[in-house]
Image (cartoon, rainbow, N blue to C red):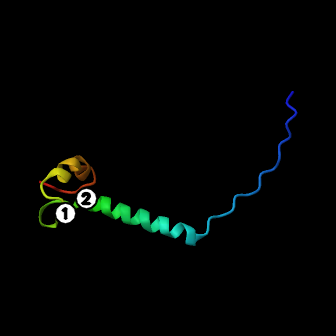
Amino acid sequence: MNDAVLQPVDALAPIPLRELLPWIVFGGLLMLLVLYFVGAEEGATSLVPGMVVHEFVHDGRHLLGFPCH
């Protein structure tokens, strides 16, 4: 037999919003940057010259419904 005694676990403390807010903002900005590169990185608004980024995210553009042809 096992003679270990189970101890009750204290409830987890909630994380305050002011500690989560910087991570939420960072995640939102990162998502906007990814959305830009997938959806609009070509032509006149291009940050990277050439078609390297466009070709890299080409299938993702079509999957998300962005036209590119």
Q: Is residue 46 left or right of residue 17?
A: left
Q: Percent from the top left, x then y, of residue 20? A: 54, 66
Horizontal arrangement in the rendering, residue 7 relative to residue 13 (left or right):
right
Q: Residue at x 26, y 49 (%)?
A: 60
Of the residues tagged 1 and 2, which is closer to the observer? 1
Quarter of the rendering containing residue 6: top right
Residue 5 vertical position relative to residue 30 in the rendered view, above or below: above
Image coordinates for residue 63, horizontal then vertical, percent: 27, 49
**Residue at (61, 69) in percent of width and height:** 16
Going by the numbered disc 2, the residue's amino acid type is: Phe
Where residue 44 appears, x then y in whole percent? 12, 66
Looking at the rendered structure, the number of numbered marks drawn on it comes to 2
- Quick one: which residue is furthest to the top in this view? 1
Query: Which part of the image, by quadrant, shows the N terminus?
Result: top right
* Mark 2 Cα shell of 10 Å, populated few (<14), some (14-19), many (≥20): some
> Residue 25 appears in which quarter of the rendering?
bottom left
| Quarter that holds the C terminus | bottom left
Q: Position of residue 12 (x, y in %)?
A: 70, 58
Helix, strand or loop for disc 1: loop
* Rendered image: mark on residue 47: 1
Which amino acid is tagged 1? Leu
SS type, badge 2: helix
Residue 21 relative to residue 37: left or right? right
Q: CA distance from mark 1 to mark 2?
A: 9 Å
Q: Which mark is residue 37?
A: 2
Q: Mark 2 or mark 1, which is nearer the start of the sequence?
A: 2
- Residue 24 drawn above or below residue 3: below
Q: Is there a contact, CB below 8 Å, between mark 1 and mark 2?
A: no
Front one among 61 and 48? 48
Identify which residue is drawn at 17% across, 56% down. Answer: 67
